[in-house]
Image (cartoon, helix red, strand yellow):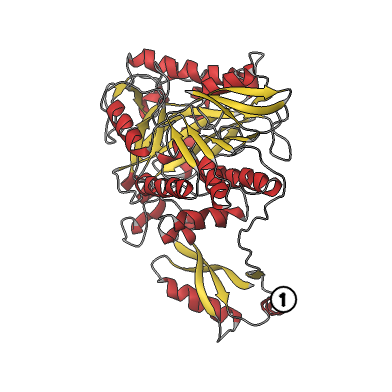
Amino acid sequence: MSLFVSGLRLPFDAPDEEALALAMRQCGLCEGTPSLYRRSLDARHGKINKVCSVRIDGVDGEEAFAQRLQMPSVRYKKSEPFVLEPGAAALGHRPVVVGLGPAGLFCAYILARYGYRPIVFERGGALEERDGAVRRFWDGGALDPECNIQFGEGGAGAYSDGKLTTRINDPLCETVLQILHENGAPSEILTQAKPHIGTDLLKGVVGRMRRAIETAGGEVHFRTRLTGLVLRGDALAGLRVDGGELACERAVLALGHSARDTFGMLHEAGVLLEPKPFSVGVRIEHTQAAIDRAMYGKHAGHPALPPAEYALSHREGGRACYSFCMCPGGTVVAAASEPGGVVTNGMSSHARDGANANAALVVSVQPEDFADGTPLGGIAFQRKLEQAAYAATRSYRAPCQTVGDFLTGRPSKRAGAVAPTYPAGVVYGDLTPVLPPFAADLLRRSLPVFGRKLRGFDDSEALLTGPETRTSSPVRIVRGADMSSLSIRGLIPCGEGAGYAGGIMSAAIDGIRAASRLVSEFAPL
């Protein structure tokens, strides 16, 4: 067991050693080994503090000691390493994982580690090939529908800020961070309250994890798309993929939120799907210097302070407008995966050293907004917005408008102080026609609210680029408590595409749980 001392507040530029010493003093300890457990910044109320949690090892009788102190900030916790106990049932064929985004990657990694030699099918390319396809598209080349920001090794998360935050409180968070660190992620992710890797470093981590899967006997097949299911009654007997058919009785579906054709195939095959909420909107850009000044005041630019980030939300009449996937020092990127549609997203490197800050600014969409009698109505809703944006620019360039013009209903003719970072180019005009009316209206009402919460957020020269449509999957592949599909035995839907995660961390955890489900039932191969 270890002692944990939380809520230690220090000046933002104080060295970590001061937190260790403060924890020992608060506990009245002269012996023990303190180490930094978590570190965050609190920039509220006009004062910036570093807030730390410290772990203390080597204290005799930690549980009794913490109880005697009776201090809410001091607790004890038993360290429990992640260990699985394999089952005894025989698995007739090697398990298959479909998709190599965060959920599929972590699922296959755990299966390989425990001797199950998984076969992985990924419709996109390996990272080196994928980087080339993405860059060519951003430079004006053709879109590759099978290899782009949405599809390929690492999934959509490989082109993001690499955020490792989640609102779920799950002990597997520590396991995910440790695995990432073992595969080359910087050690700081183990102590940051809001860890991130950055797209530049994350790609290297993904490649190392894939090679570890292969070294342990797994196989990864790129440019291989799932095209059908082979069923025996209501049980899975195999998969049809580009190039052939493979027998298997257990397959993990980690498809990602943009596998629209695959969702359609599953629906036709009788897999139980249901529509789920998601959000749509725009990307908003400010200069990073402006966000730093708004958050840090006179301390903006201090070398001890990281590029500032924010989270904003406003609710009206049962609908929410909120910031999402905020990328300090980042870039707005072209993220289309279908011909004839414009999609925006955000990305930043580990250093977060770009001139602009960007975030999705989105409005919630409920199934009743797109009900069409099928579980796939949300896909049609997203596609309509993406195609409207393409029609507005007659290209993969994105519609762009200043906040001032958006709020007053005037088409923009040029940018002001904030230069757009969207790599495929922008066309200035009016974003209203490419957004649902309810979303445009709530965005207009929310921007001034956010400006009162964060000074300058609604500055007239801040920039809006859109549409942002791929915030999460519009479909859920319904599963039971054992993670298996309720309609097809042997199918295990998991991750963001299946509707059970939102972001790298929660998707990775869901992938680990899917692997754990297989390990607990079957013996290694």
- At 51% from the left and 23% from the top, the residue drawn is 244
User: Is residue 105 shown to the viewer in this render?
Assistant: yes
- Residues 411 and 307: in front is 307
How many numbered discs?
1
Q: Is residue 52 left or right of residue 60?
A: left
Q: Which residue is mark 1?
A: 67
**Vertical placement of 116 versus 64: above or below?**
above
Task: Please identify the quarter of the rendering in which residue 416 is found.
Answer: top left
Task: Please identify the quarter of the rendering in which residue 23 is found.
Answer: bottom right
- The residue sitting at the bottom extreme is 30
Q: Position of residue 278 (x, y in %)?
A: 57, 29
Q: Position of residue 492 (x, y in %)?
A: 64, 35
**Vertical placement of 347 versus 22: above or below?**
above
Q: Is residue 48 left or right of residue 288?
A: right
Task: Please identify the quarter of the rendering in which residue 438 is found.
Answer: top right
Q: Position of residue 43 (x, y in %)?
A: 46, 56
Helix, strand or loop status at disc 1: helix
- Residues 288 and 151: in front is 151
**Residue kind at label 1, given as amino acid type:** Gln
